[in-house]
Amino acid sequence: MMGLRRPLSHPAEIFRRRERRWIGSASVLAILAVATPARAADWPRLPLDLLERTDSLAAMAFAAGAVVSAIVAALAHLAGRRRRTARVARLRAANADLQAKAASAQALLATEPQILIAWNSPHGEPEIEGDLSLIASEAERRPVLGFGSWLPLATALQMERRVEALRSRGEGFHMAIQSLAGRHLDAEGRAVGGRAILRVRDVSGDRLDLTRLREQHAQIAAGLDTLKALLDAMPDPAWTRDQAGRLTWANAAYARAVEAPQGTDAVAAQLELLDRPARVAADDARRERRIWQGQVNAIVAGARHMLNVLDVPVPQGSVGIAADRSDLEAARADFARQMDSHARTLDQLTTAVAIFDGAKRLVFHNAAYRQLWPLDAAFLDQHPSDGEILDHLRAERRLPEQADFRAWKAGLMAAYTSLESAEHIWHIPDGRTLRAVTSPNSQGGVTYLFDDVTERQNLEAKYNALYRVQSETLDTLKEGVAVFGMDGRLNLFNPAFAEMWKLDLAELEGRPHVDKVARLCEPLSPSAETWRGIRSVVSGLHDARTALTDRLTRGDGMVIDYSAAPLPDGATLLTFTDVTAGVNVERALKERNQALIDAEKLRNDFVHHVSYELRSPLTSITGFIELLGGEMVGPLNAKQREYCEAISKSSAALLAIIGDILDLATIDRGAMALELSSVDVEKTIAAAALGVQDRIDEMKLRLDISVAPDIDPFVADVKRLRQILFNLLSNAVGFSQPHQVVSLSAARQGEEIVFTVRDSGRGIPRELLDRVFNRFETHTNGSRHRGVGLGLAMVRSFVELHGGRVHIESVRGEGTTVTCIFPASPVTQRLQEKDRPDDVSIVDAAIHLAH
């Protein structure tokens, strides 16, 4: 394998190695040439085969040529080395110069906060340098070219368009922008040497002031253009003059007044609207820096007009405006004539009218106003102010009572600065109700209108109260209600009617005819006869309108009782009542009753069949197995004997299950009768323990039996008690582990006998404790215990049949304790109807037997 060579870090190192190899080769050849004459005998040991096959003269010539070639090659190499050394020196100097320039450029770039972005080609990747903190903090890391992340949306879109134009067409731009962080920046883009350069700089100091001044200048210019456009739209002439009194600007109305095409033409020709005396007076006021105002007769568009002129001095000269008052004076004369006519008309009205001018003084009132507010005529002729009249009326208790009269009065006076009319309802202490309307007029005053609406308010209140009561009553009814008028159109309905017949409220609010309502409801009706009869009652086709009552069952299963009753005003009232729930309950009760009857019959039949169809064959099987096991029909080998024992145990277990099911069925039927007698507790416990002794021995368990010495015999069914204890011991043994302890204790507590069975097995989870007494509820919980789940159900049934009760306690991993409490005195109790299990439990028993 070839060895790894160390990589060269610099070209000079390569040159030096090559030089050493060339000098070494030349030295070897020179030594060979010198040593050839003296030691020719040693040549055969050289590695060159050529020298071995030549004579001395040829070898000397060859050596001389080699020496010459080596010298020439060495000289050529030295010359090349000098050239390369010089070139390396020039490159080093150029590199140092470039590094100095780069450092200078970096220093120049760092002199101010800025970001430089360069694109070498329109579609190339950009080079980004500079301080990125200009656009975001170090923690945010926003992309520079993602303008939308650090600029407002409008500015970001404009920047993207400008940058795209710069990269594609080389169009430069300059923008003053503000980032989302509120920082003022200057963005400049230009094409330099075929590259697109974008520079973003921080604007501060003089640059920021210059930028703000530019913005202010743009705003001022825009505002000036807006003001000029507004003045051009005004109908009154307006103008500006310089310090010498010459026109510098005029609006369109001024140009029309002096009959010039445009305002610029009027300024160029210095066309004057005002006469000389008015201009002299305005010039004197301008020099004295005061406002001049006066009325001037002027020729406007070839006609004489009276102008109200206002000239205001400004630093650059003055600003003037002329308002035409000719039409106003004519309007005033017409208004005076009209007011006299209106006053005579208003005096005939029953509505009280009072007119106040801009100074809030009474200028007119009619006769109804004087009658509404019995004020002194002399007081009204003095043209009192609005506030004085209100204070006078308040002193006489003729205004509505107010907790804060000053605030109420201020709200009423706000009508003088309002643009819209306002309506108020005043409840006067004397029992009257007034409707007051304040209407601003064009002269800055207010017109008051007062109407006495006491009687109308009372009637409306009564009607509204009655209507609300009726509407709310109908809306809260669950019955659908609809009232049709004499014309057959729907006048009134409640939401229950629309919901019951699935009708659109908007369509019903259009007062449809009964024929249309019938067409809308017929899809849900079982037949067309129903609504045909309703239409007959509503339309009054019969000579005598009679009521109609019936029941219908719709296609969707809803049962409705409906009635149509004629009303005295010719209208018809329809009511619809949903009785589906009651009908369904009635049907369910009937079906339930029939189901109970059928279940009772099924249960009785099942018990009968179980008794004769299952128990009898099992008895036969048990008998035959005993014959086989007893070898009465011939000897059996060990395997056959084992099979017989298994069949015998299974038959006995199945027979016990059938017996339990029959007992439960008897209890369910209420036919279980206890055979009460005196119970010897110790003997009963011993008999129950004997039934599980073989399983205890098999699992190597220890059974501790504890009977209190003071316990006396009590009255109970010995067979059922023994069955209870056997089932409890069977469960305890089944859920125990080898070498554990199962205990059974009996004691008297007052008038009760308490039996307790405790094991140290796996325990029962808390979520299963409430279900362990249910029939066919089996949970192995990881043990080898198997069963159909009837043991604890039998225990609870027999204990409750004795009038006792059962408690169970269990801790996961520590064991289970079952306590059965019997009354010491005999109490025979049958299961109540509510405690009986469902009838399907007998069917479940058959299913479990099949499994």
Image (spheres, rainbow, N blue to C red):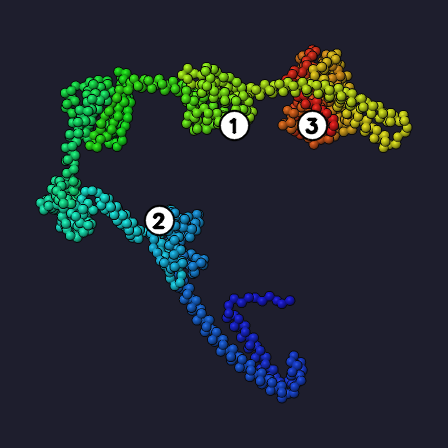
The label shown at residue 778 is 3
Choose between 363 and 393: the one closer to the eye. Answer: 363
Relative to 33, is 530 above or below?
A: above
Q: Which mark is in front, 1 or 3?
A: 1
Q: Amino acid at mark 1?
A: Pro
In the rendered structure, the answer to whether residue 538 lies left or right of residue 817 reads: left
For the residue carrying disc 2, how many other residues have a C-alpha within 10 Å: few (<14), some (14-19), or many (20+)? some
Q: Quadrant of the C terminus?
A: top right
Q: Earlier in the sequence, mark 1 or mark 3?
A: 1
State the image quarter where residue 668 is shown. top right
Q: Nearer the viewer, residue 497 or 727?
A: 497
Task: Say which residue label 2 marks.
Answer: 178
Q: Which mark, residue 523? A: 1
For the point 17% across and 29% down, which residue is it? 338
Q: Check contact, mark 2 vs mark 3: CB within 8 A.
A: no
Q: Report the amino acid beneath label 2.
A: Gln
In the rendered image of this protein, does residue 208 appear above or below residue 802?
below
The amino acid pointed to by label 3 is Thr
Q: Position of residue 43 (x, y in %)?
A: 65, 83
- Which residue lies most toward the left here? 277
Q: Does residue 27 sit above or below 844 in this rendering?
A: below
The earlier-in-sequence mark between 2 and 3 is: 2
- Tell how many labels: 3
Side of 351 where 675 appears, left or right? right
